[in-house]
Image (cartoon, grey):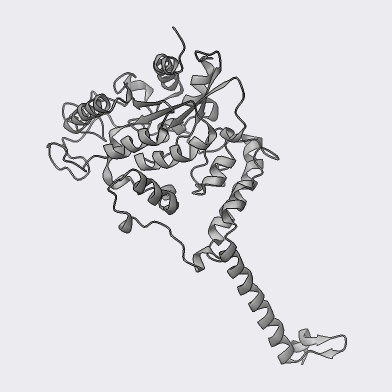
Amino acid sequence: MSGWRWLEGAEGSYSWSFVGRVLAKALALFLLTNLAFAAIDPWPLLGRISLYGHLAPLRPRFPYGEQPDRSYSLSLSDMNALFGSHVIARPKAGDEYRVILIGDSSVWGFLLRPDETLAVALNDLAMTSGDGRQIRAYNLGYPEMSLFKDLLLLDRALAHDPDLIVWLVTLESFAPQRQLAPALVRDNADAVRRLAAQHALDLDLDNAGLAEPDLLGRTIVGRRRALADWLRYQLYGLAWAATGIDQIYPDEIALRASDLQADESWHDFDRPRDFAAGEISFPVLAAGNERAGATPLLVVNEPMFISDGANSDVRYNFWYPRWAYDRYRELLHAEAASAGWNLVDLWDAIAPQEFTDSPVHLTPEGTRQLAELLQPAIRQLAGEAF
């Protein structure tokens, strides 16, 4: 009987019926708690609770990637947690002219230290607006190629009262199949459907894998991964504050290819031909300009690596055949002129040696050069005479 002594109490032995009642009550409490969590849906409020700005400093860029043994970051899709941990959450100063930068991993600063990004390089230029306010840039880039992902972040960033939006784009972000692919997009179904409806965007939302949780998905059990990620991200804040490490910096970088294949394909295009309607996502870029409203928006065709190696007469780099990229630029300029967008085209403005592992990732020096190239347009839109 020694194996059953856990059933014994001070007054004698507990009965199996007693144990059953305890387990039934525990199960009922567990189910009621989960149902209450689903019914109340406190997740939006919970996402706003943050150690950042209190026990840990606010981050200069969004978290991305997940390798906790080497960096103190992880990919999150919760907008409240992302913006709540970012320096843009600080109240806007009275003498601040706020510029937000959106775009892909080049804006975010892949392989760059937090103090080497484009936002920091722009801030180092110490620009002022026409009314004397200090121009301060904020890094809201996110490392996936999708204009709709950028639109989602732009939409949320407007709550932080920007004075100017700078949107860096490249052809790869215009591919229709990329628009709804990022997890950040798929995990924010309500905002995605709202933006698509507001701007009449022709997107295949029904087959996009949008995360629209049912009753079970809204329970604690259904949100257990999101809850765990939220908690880990809060705890990472302390380690990140001590180290400043928010991504992996390899000892050696495999540089972008200079010798290329004699291949003229790009995504679904296996040979040169014109882009038909819907085959390149200009409507999403138009939606971003519409959503910005009265806030000035500067579209920047970002610099890219241009190869001079084998088959460079066929392809600019391993992303782009020449015919596709040249046609994209023609269309971009035509769309901007027709719609009255502010456009700066810097596609060939940075020397090839200033690119690292991809056609758009810049070295720290290349990033500083890009900031200087953007300075005239930013100062002009900010109303500064020069």
Q: Residue at x 22, y 26 (%)?
A: 334
Q: What x and y, as percent, mark residue 228?
A: 58, 56
Residue situated furthest top in the rendering? 386
Q: What x and y, as percent, mark residue 302?
A: 34, 26
* Image quarter of residue 142: top left
Q: Residue at x 27, y 26 (%)?
A: 336
Q: What x and y, as percent, mark residue 57?
A: 65, 35
- Between 180 and 12, which is closer to the camera in this rendering? 180
Q: Is residue 374 above or below residue 332?
A: above
Q: Is residue 142 in view? A: no
Q: Is residue 234 above or below residue 130?
A: below
Along the horizontal axis of the image, is 365 left or right of 38? left
Give the position of the C terminus as an image quadrant.
top left
- Between 287 and 214, which is closer to the camera in this rendering? 287
Along the horizontal axis of the image, is 12 left or right of 338? right
Q: What x and y, as percent, mark residue 235?
A: 65, 47
Along the horizontal axis of the image, is 127 left or right of 203? right
Q: Is residue 198 above or below residue 355?
A: below
Q: Is residue 275 in view? A: yes
Q: Residue at x 49, y 35 (%)?
A: 158
Residue situated furthest right in the rendering? 11
- Between 369 and 70, which is closer to the camera in this rendering? 369
- Between 43 and 106, which is closer to the camera in this rendering? 43
Q: Residue at x 54, y 59 (%)?
A: 225
Along the horizontal axis of the image, is 369 left or right of 15? left
Give the position of the N terminus as an image quadrant.
bottom right
* Labels in figure, total: 0
